[in-house]
Image (spheres, rainbow, N blue to C red):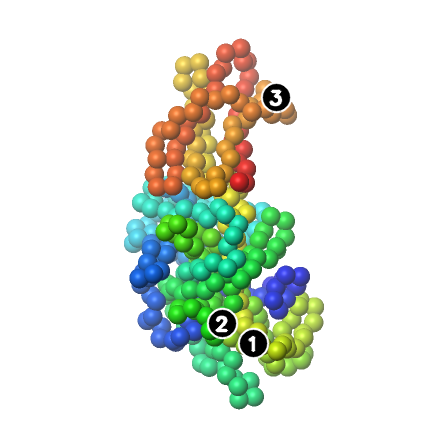
Amino acid sequence: MALAALCLFGCVSLADAVILYRTGDPSQNTSAPLNDVAGSGWNYEGIYGGFLGSAISPHHFITAQHFGEQGNVFTFGSVDYHIVGRFPDPQSDLVTYKVAETLPSFASLYSRTDEAGQRTVDIGRGTQRGGGYSLNGTPLGWLWGGGDGVKRWGENTFSSVYPNGANWDLLYATFDQNGLVNECTLSSGDSGGAAFLNDGNICKLAGINYAVDGPFSENADGSLAFSAALYDTRGLYTSDGNSWFRITGASAVPTGFYPTRISTKLAWICSVVASPEIGHEGNFVTLTYTKLLLNPAVGYVVEQSSDLRTWTTATTIDETVSTSGSSAVIKAKVDLTNKTQLFLRLRTTQP
């Protein structure tokens, strides 16, 4: 898939498993992180078909759109939860699913826009690290290995943010030789997995795996193209979506990966999770919805109309029905006095 105007190389492949720099042992990093990366989102990841999804509310998980629907079950903590709603974002690769049962835990969302420069733990499910790749006798990295469907984690540091269209940003991290102890990149199978950040000792969801740099070729015409986890691509050819060009530079040019950025999709995510329901109590109409408790906060406003054309902010009496983790169920009451016809809606806005 071409991202010519924004990617390091201009062309990317959709991402699918975590590949580590320090080892090709497929048994490494296949259980929850410990020590200084403990509590880094591992337990918020569930299985959705051949991919991963991240629990984000008592009844919702989020993942990537591009691999399509994977059935009607989300397996979370070895328990099956049944999907009753699908909500694709029309402006990005994100899709949110609603499950009938109540998820026991879920991730808080990262709502600040300072991700660049921060250390991330990324979780995916897909290929192992393959054989080493060299160009003219110089080692450059590793080919993608066979897919094993194993959940695996690694670390990296976000270096930048790329706009990928209207209201769709991608975070970017590179596969560096002098990187972190568990330096990683992604490969085929990691799509839908997640990137987490530590925010004041709270693990928060910052991105959903989308794509990686590549493919590459040793030939100027792009023939015999391949995908790989490379810490240096100099001397190879890649495409900008229109033509192939040779990669050069005075220092190493590593491949990188691109999660879809969560912090600029908060209004849409919160509108889906809200799942507002209308009720009636005495002389009041009620709108009950799920509110995500974020810092900075997303704005929630109940609006009213008598004709579905003109909308104004409604005066509400709000009641917190219950709280669960970083969410609360809110019941907003609107007085029906002197109203013959009333429509309500809930508007969410970015912080």
Which mark is drawn over residue 176? 2
Q: Which mark is residue 307?
A: 3
Q: Earlier in the sequence, mark 1 or mark 2?
A: 2
Mark 1 = which residue? 252
The answer to whether residue 103 is visible is yes
Q: Secondary structure at mark 1?
A: loop
Q: Circles 1 and 2: CB distance less than 8 Å?
A: yes
At x 55%, y 47%, the residue is 264
Residue 326 in picture, x, y percent from top left: 38, 41
Q: Determine the residue positioned at 33% across, 46% down.
A: 105
Q: Residue furthest top?
A: 338
Is disc 1 surrounded by few (<14), some (14 to 19) or many (20+) residues within 10 Å? some
Disc nearer the start of the sequence (2/3): 2
Foreground mark, 2 or 3, reads 2
Horizontal side of residue 168 vs 204, given as left or right: right
Marks 2 and 3 sit apart, C-alpha to C-alpha, by 58 Å
Q: Position of residue 212 (x, y in %)?
A: 53, 66
| C-alpha span from label 1 to label 3 | 62 Å
Q: Amino acid at mark 2?
A: Asp
Label 1 is placed on what type of residue?
A: Ala
